[in-house]
Amino acid sequence: MARNNQHVVPEAREALNKLKMEIASEVGVNLKQGYNGDLTSKDAGRIGGGMVRSMIKSVEDGMK
């Protein structure tokens, strides 16, 4: 089993980063490349939640 800090599919890292930046832009969070230590938990949750919703929608659309 993969560790939490390792991706199961390493090639997916770039796609996940792109999705993260897109979602951050959509929800109005100023996310920059690299370290974002000043990001609030609320904003991080908004980004993560948006990513999960987007991935679920993608899978659901693929099932139709």
Image: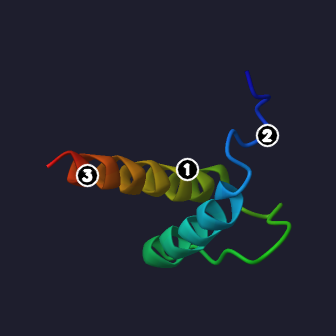
Mark 2 element type? loop
Question: Which residue bears the numbered disc 3?
Answer: 62
How many labels, in total? Answer: 3
Marked residue nearer the N-terminal end (2 or 1): 2
- Quick check: 53 left or right of 8? left
Marked residue nearer the N-terminal end (1 or 3): 1
- Quick check: 55 left or right of 18? left
- Quick check: 41 left or right of 55? right
Q: CA distance from mark 2 to mark 3?
A: 26 Å
**Amino acid type of the residue that numbered disc 2 sits on in the rendered structure:** Gln
- Image location (x, y in percent) of residue 16: 61, 60
The residue closer to the viewer here, 41 or 64, is 64
The residue closer to the viewer here, 26 or 54, is 54
Question: Which residue bears the numbered disc 1?
Answer: 45
Mark 1 element type? helix
Question: Which residue bears the numbered disc 2?
Answer: 6
- Image location (x, y in percent) of residue 10: 74, 51
- Image location (x, y in percent) of residue 11: 70, 57
Q: CA distance from mark 2 to mark 1?
A: 20 Å
